[in-house]
Amino acid sequence: MSFCGYFLTALIILKQHFTAAERSVPPAPTLIQNAVIDSSVELICQAPRGYSGLKFKLFKIRNLTQTIQHSTKEQRARFMLMGKDTGKENLYCCQYENSMFSSYMHPEPKDFSPPPSPHLMVEPSSGHVTPGETLSFHCQAPPDHQKHPPETFLLLQRAKGTPGSMVAPAKLVSQSLEAHFSVKTMGREDSGEYVCLYQLKLPKTGHVNSTASQPVHITVIELPVPTLSLSRHEGEFLECVGSPAYLKGFFSLFRVGVLSPEATHQASLTQHSARFPVPTRYEHGAQYQCQYSVSLGKFWAYSKMSTPVTLPCITGYHTCTQVSTAQTWLLLLALCLRVFCSSWWCHSWALPCTDISKTSQKEGDKENKKNSGNIFTPEIILLTSLCSVLTLDLRAVERC
């Protein structure tokens, strides 16, 4: 091969190498301005669809200014510019992993004004609910004169004591393409102020957030769990004690595993407890628990069930199903005699004791004929009857 041939071959190989290297570089992301919060500007570095990265970088001209490291691969990263960095004379671009660089953009802090705030409504309108109830929120956006309908609605729970109405310190509760949110309350941690906002996609600035709505106050009323105890002072009764903050409540006594209450009493105007007589008949080891409810204006609040209390068998006062001392001795005697009866029955009748694996059927028949002459003696009949009676009595005791 001539020198020209070697040279052309080398060029082809180098071209394929650099072409493959260019193809391995991830495509460039998009850098847009998302929102203006006070005197700061938020930029979003968005990777193309199907691409993501752990590390995102923001450059000012050619100088690296910020780096965001994610714990998992993400498709976007948010950068916040403050002070002099928000000036229009600045140029910014971004990169994810070792991708190509995005196009440059100028921040626009002064010419941008966020969309007006929406109106937030909630059902029930009082904002008072109990754990397990569902809140229905509606975030109503104002008429858009620029004909840009909201793309996304966000519902946030504002932290206690947060000044102002901006959304940065609030916790995101839900995000939806619709203006309706359904939130099932779990406990007191769901109490607080809720606000909503919406996002628009504008031609110049990209996705922008509106200002937050006026807050609505939610109060999740969770009644303290009552206590149930067995008292033998001035009689025997079960006492259910609720919270002293809620007087004149209704107290119900339940047997564990039964949905309907055994009894329901209303406390007096100055009391937050109720007493229930111990049932006259109950099974030994029966468990009971209680619950109370109070009226809070237009709705009722219910507490959780108390810790179960096990009722002992109180001899002389109540009738409960319990194994007595006589039955215990009878149980032991019946167990001993059952072993004896089983052994005697086998050797007398031969059939139950015949091991089929070791004895042939003919040998078993011969043994049966051999013993057939002395089966029905008076002693055997008496012992057989005794064993049958004890076995039946043992089964009755075991059922108790």
Image (cartoon, rainbow, N blue to C red):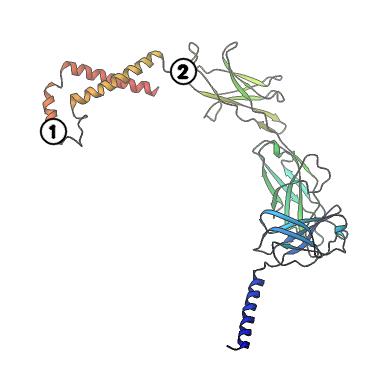
> Residue 304 is drawn in which quadrant?
top right
50 is higher (above) or lower (below) than 325: below
Whether residue 145 is visible here, answered yes or no, is: yes
Residue 320 numbered mark, or none: 2
SS type, badge 2:
strand
Residue 321, image x, y percentages = 44, 19
Q: Position of residue 213 (x, y in %)?
A: 80, 48
Quarter occupied by residue 183? top right
- Number of marks in the image? 2
Q: Residue 269 placed where, x, y %?
A: 71, 20
Query: Residue 363: which disc?
Result: 1
88 or 293: which is nearer to us? Answer: 88
Provide the secondary structure element on which disc 1 rests.
helix
Q: Which-is-in-front pick, marks 2 and 1? A: 1
Q: Nearer the viewer, residue 66 or 276?
A: 66
Amino acid at circle 1: Glu
Figure quadrant of the N terminus? bottom right
Task: Name which residue type carries label 2.
Answer: Cys
Indicate which disc, 2 or 1, sits on the residue closer to the N terminus. 2
